[in-house]
Image (tube, rainbow, N blue to C red):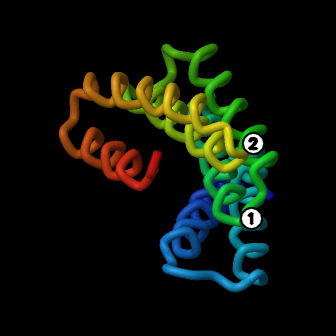
Amino acid sequence: MTPEEHRRLGVELYNGTWELIERESRTPDEDDEMLHRAHASAYHWLHGPHTAANRARSHWLCSRAHVLAAQPEGALHHARRCLDLVESHGEEMEDWDLAAAHEALSRAHAAVGEIEEARRLLGLAREETAVIANPKDRQHIEADLGTLAL
């Protein structure tokens, strides 16, 4: 496959993962498919033209999929990788990536039952969200934060 074909598949699988994430309920088979799509998307992004931001966002997506599939250890792993990439490649990130990384980590800690740490990270995510310049980006992150019942 060419790098461009990998990139195209990465995008398609990312969007396809969202189709499953947004469902009200999923069967165990659909949870498996959601996880496979998220990981396949990340794989293809790695082999296509990509940036550290693409890699961080791939880890963010994998973390979300693991939370929804009731696999909190996987969620923590990917949320930590997301934050590591965002912090170590800040110059390549958008102003919303740090807020999203803290949101993912908050959600993952909540999934493992570490509620105080989840609340602390949610606070950091809210602080970072407040400085997002684009109102649409800010609203998108705020909507995600609003789904965390802590």
Horizontal arrangement in the rendering, residue 137 relative to residue 44 (left or right): left
| 3D distance between C-alphas at marks 1 and 2 | 17 Å
Q: Is residue 5 left or right of residue 134?
A: right
Q: Is residue 16 above or below residue 51?
A: below
Q: Which mark is residue 46?
A: 2
Q: Is residue 47 left or right of residue 97?
A: right
Q: Reading the chain from its start, which is encountered first: label 1 or label 2?
A: 1
Vertical arrangement, residue 105 with respect to residue 124, above or below: below
Image quarter of residue 6 = bottom right
Rendering coords of residue 18 (x, y %): 53, 66
Which of labels 1 and 2 is toward the front? 1
Nearer the observer, 116 or 77: 116
Total number of numbered discs in the rendering: 2
Across and down, in percent, residue 21 comes to: 55, 68
Q: Amino acid at mark 1?
A: Leu
Q: Residue sitting at 63 percent across and 82 percent down?
A: 26
Q: Vertical placement of 137 versus 85: above or below?
A: below
Position of residue 81 relative to residue 41, above or below, is: above
**Residue at the left extreme of this rendering:** 135
In the rendering, which numbered label is found on residue 35?
1
Does residue 118 show up?
yes
Type of the residue with mark 2: Leu
- The secondary element bearing badge 1 is classed as helix
- Residue 11 image point, x, y percent: 57, 58
